[in-house]
Image (tube, grey):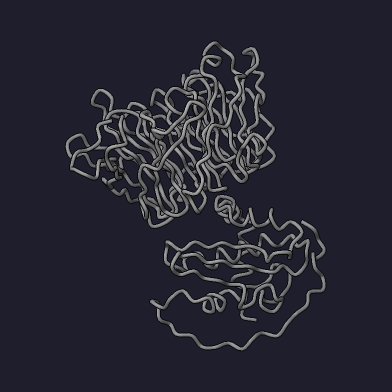
C-alpha cells in the first residue's frame, strides 16, 4: 500500500451517544463484517454499563442494540469478545470480570470471575479462545482456563509488576501474554512445558530502551513479529522479535527495541492499535487521533515511521481508546471522556474516494 | 489509617480579603477566580481551609488559555504528608465540571515540598487512579467532608 503519493485524512462517519459518563474502552466483535454479518461494537463506561452497537446493513448507521447493566457496580474499564464472538468479557473497578453470552441479541451474564483484590483494568482472550487473562491495581496478572459450560478456572496468578497493571494482551498467534504497567515496564509471560507453570520470561524496562513512565497500552502487527506500546512519557515505541525463532516454538525469543516515536504527542497517550494493513493509530489526552505508517526511508538496520495524518479535536475531551475494525468495512472506532464513541473512515483528501484497504 | 494526626500543630494563617467577582459565565478562565473557588476547601485533617494552612495561595494557580491548560501547585503542610493525595483528589473533584471540557488540569505538589514528590505527582495525574479513588466510598466520604463542610 502506497502512502507516499497522497494525503490522507480521517473522516467522521458517526457519533454514538448514549453513555452517561466517560467511555473507557471498545471491542469489535470478531465476526464483524464477515459473510454479511453486520459490524458490531461494544463500548464500556464509567456509567457502569456496556453498550452494544450494531451497524444496519441497509443504512450503514450504528444503533445501540443492547445495554448491559445491573451487573457491575462500578466503572467498566475494559471489554473483549471471545474469538468466536459468542462471549463478551467485561472487566470492572468492582474487582470482578463478567462473562456475557449473546443469545440472539439478548446478553446474559453467565459467569463472574472473582479474585482480584481491587480494580480490574483489562481483559484479553488468547487466539484460540482457550485462555483469558486479566490484570489490575493489585499488581497481579491472572490467567484463566476456559472450560465447557461457561466455567472458568484460574490457572495462574502472576506476580512481578511492582505497580498497577494497566493492560494485558495475548500475542496474536502464540500463547504468550504481554502486560504493561504503572511501573513503566512491559512484561512477557510464557508457560514452561505446558503444565500451567507460567512465569515472566522478559521485562522491557528503561534499560532496554523502554518507557520512562506508565505504559498504558500495547498492540501487535498482523504477523506478530512487531509490537507497539504507548506511554505517559509521551512516546510510542516499536519492538520486534525474531519471527523464525518464535514460530519454531521458542517462546523465549527476546523482544528488542526498534524505534521510538517522540515529539508527536504532548499529553499522555492512552491507546495504540496496529491495523492489519500496518497503520498505527494512537489516541491521546490532547483529544487527538494520530496515524503512523512505516516510512519509505526505513533502512536495513531498523524501521522508521512517519506521521500519516493527525485529527485534532477528534473528541471534546481525552481519547481513551482507538480500535481498527478487523474485517470487512474498514473503520476506526474511538472512545472518549466526553462520553461518546466515534466511527471514522480513512480516506484520501485529494478526492472523494475511500481508501480501499 | 493512623489514629494520631499526621501534623498535629499546623500553622494557621488569616484568610485574605475576598474581592467580589462577576458571575459572567463567558468570562475567561481566570486564575484568581479558580483560587476563589478552591481556597475554602477544608484540609482533610484540620478544621481549617487550605488557604488558612497556606496549602494554597493565589500563586498556586496558572492558566494557559491558548493551550487550554491549568496547573495547580499546592504545598502540603509537612514533607511527609500522607494526605497529599487526598488534597489532590479534593481539588480535582471540586473543579470537575468547572471549565470548558477541552481544558486539561494538572495538579502537583510545589517543588521541594514533599518527600515523595514524584510519586505523589504521578498518582495525582493518573486519571484512572483518580477515577477509581473517587469511586471508593471511604475516600469519597472524606473528600465530600472537605468540600461540603460548613463555611468556616
Tell me which residue sits at (43%, 48%) in the image: A23
Q: Position of residue A151 (x, y in %)?
A: 53, 23
Quarter occupied by residue A152: top right
Q: Viewer-proximal residue, A226 or A72?
A: A226
Q: Nearer the viewer, residue A248 or A17?
A: A248
Task: Tell which of A337 and A271 is nearer to you.
Answer: A271
Residue in the image at 45% along x and 33% along y: A80
- Residue under the image location 42 percent in, 56 percent down: A317
Quarter of the image for residue B74 reads: bottom right
Residue A243's spot in the image, x, y percent? Answer: 51, 18
Would you identify the image quadrant in which residue A40 lies?
A: top left
The percent position of residue A215, horizontal first and vertical second, equals 57, 41
Q: Is residue A92 left or right of residue A182?
A: left
> Which quadrant of the figure contains the C terminus of chain B?
bottom right
Look at 40% across and 53% down and name the residue there: A339
Q: Is residue A338 left or right of residue A209?
A: left
* Residue B84 visible in image: yes
The answer to whether residue A88 is left or right of residue B60 is left
Amino acid at each position: 500500500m502506497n502512502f507516499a503519493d497522497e494525503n490522507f485524512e480521517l473522516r467522521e462517519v458517526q457519533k454514538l451517544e448514549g453513555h452517561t459518563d466517560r467511555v473507557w474502552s471498545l471491542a469489535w466483535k470478531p465476526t464483524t463484517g464477515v459473510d454479511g454479518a453486520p459490524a458490531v461494537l461494544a463500548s464500556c463506561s464509567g456509567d457502569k454499563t456496556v453498550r452494544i452497537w450494531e451497524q444496519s446493513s441497509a443504512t450503514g448507521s450504528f444503533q445501540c442494540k443492547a445495554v448491559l447493566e445491573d451487573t457491575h457496580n462500578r466503572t467498566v474499564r475494559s471489554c473483549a469478545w471471545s474469538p468466536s464472538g459468542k462471549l463478551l468479557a467485561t472487566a470492572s473497578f468492582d474487582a470482578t470480570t463478567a462473562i456475557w453470552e449473546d443469545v440472539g441479541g439478548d446478553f446474559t451474564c453467565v459467569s463472574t470471575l472473582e479474585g482480584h483484590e481491587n480494580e480490574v483494568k483489562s481483559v484479553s482472550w488468547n487466539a484460540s479462545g482457550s485462555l483469558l487473562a486479566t490484570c489490575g491495581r493489585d499488581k497481579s496478572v491472572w490467567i484463566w482456563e476456559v472450560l465447557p459450560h461457561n466455567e472458568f478456572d484460574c490457572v495462574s496468578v502472576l506476580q512481578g509488576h511492582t505497580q498497577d497493571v494497566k493492560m494485558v494482551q495475548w500475542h496474536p498467534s502464540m500463547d504468550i501474554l504481554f502486560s504493561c504497567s504503572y511501573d513503566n515496564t512491559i512484561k512477557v509471560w510464557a508457560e514452561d512445558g505446558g503444565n500451567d507453570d507460567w512465569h515472566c520470561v522478559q521485562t522491557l524496562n528503561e534499560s532496554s530502551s523502554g518507557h520512562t513512565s506508565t505504559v498504558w497500552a500495547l498492540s501487535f502487527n498482523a504477523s506478530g513479529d512487531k509490537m507497539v506500546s504507548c506511554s505517559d512519557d509521551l512516546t510510542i515505541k516499536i519492538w520486534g522479535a525474531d519471527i523464525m525463532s518464535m514460530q519454531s516454538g521458542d517462546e523465549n525469543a527476546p523482544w528488542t527495541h526498534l524505534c521510538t516515536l517522540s515529539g508527536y504527542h504532548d499529553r499522555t497517550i492512552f491507546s495504540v492499535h496496529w491495523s492489519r494493513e500496518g497503520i498505527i493509530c494512537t489516541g491521546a489526552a490532547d483529544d487527538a487521533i494520530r496515524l503512523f505508517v512505516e516510512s519509505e526511508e526505513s533502512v536495513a538496520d531498523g524501521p522508521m515511521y512517519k506521521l500519516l495524518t493527525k485529527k485534532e479535536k477528534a473528541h471534546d475531551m481525552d481519547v481513551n481508546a482507538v480500535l481498527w475494525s478487523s474485517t470487512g468495512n474498514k473503520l476506526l472506532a474511538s472512545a472518549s471522556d466526553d462520553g461518546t464513541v466515534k466511527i471514522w473512515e480513512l480516506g484520501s483528501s485529494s478526492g472523494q474516494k475511500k481508501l480501499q484497504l | 489509617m493512623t489514629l494520631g494526626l499526621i501534623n498535629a500543630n499546623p500553622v494557621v494563617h488569616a484568610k485574605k480579603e475576598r474581592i467580589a467577582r462577576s458571575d459572567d459565565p463567558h468570562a475567561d478562565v481566570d486564575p484568581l477566580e479558580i483560587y476563589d473557588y478552591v481556597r475554602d476547601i477544608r484540609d482533610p485533617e484540620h478544621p481549617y481551609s487550605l488557604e488558612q494552612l497556606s496549602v494554597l495561595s493565589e500563586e498556586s494557580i496558572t492558566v494557559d488559555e491558548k493551550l487550554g491548560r491549568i496547573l495547580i501547585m499546592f504545598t502540603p503542610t509537612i514533607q511527609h504528608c500522607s494526605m497529599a493525595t487526598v488534597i489532590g483528589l479534593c481539588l480535582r473533584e471540586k473543579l470537575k465540571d468547572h471549565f470548558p471540557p477541552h481544558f486539561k488540569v494538572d495538579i502537583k505538589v510545589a517543588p521541594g515540598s514533599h518527600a515523595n514528590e514524584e510519586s505523589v505527582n504521578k498518582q495525582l495525574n493518573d486519571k484512572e487512579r483518580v477515577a477509581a479513588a473517587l469511586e471508593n466510598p471511604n475516600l469519597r466520604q472524606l473528600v465530600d467532608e472537605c468540600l461540603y463542610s460548613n463555611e468556616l
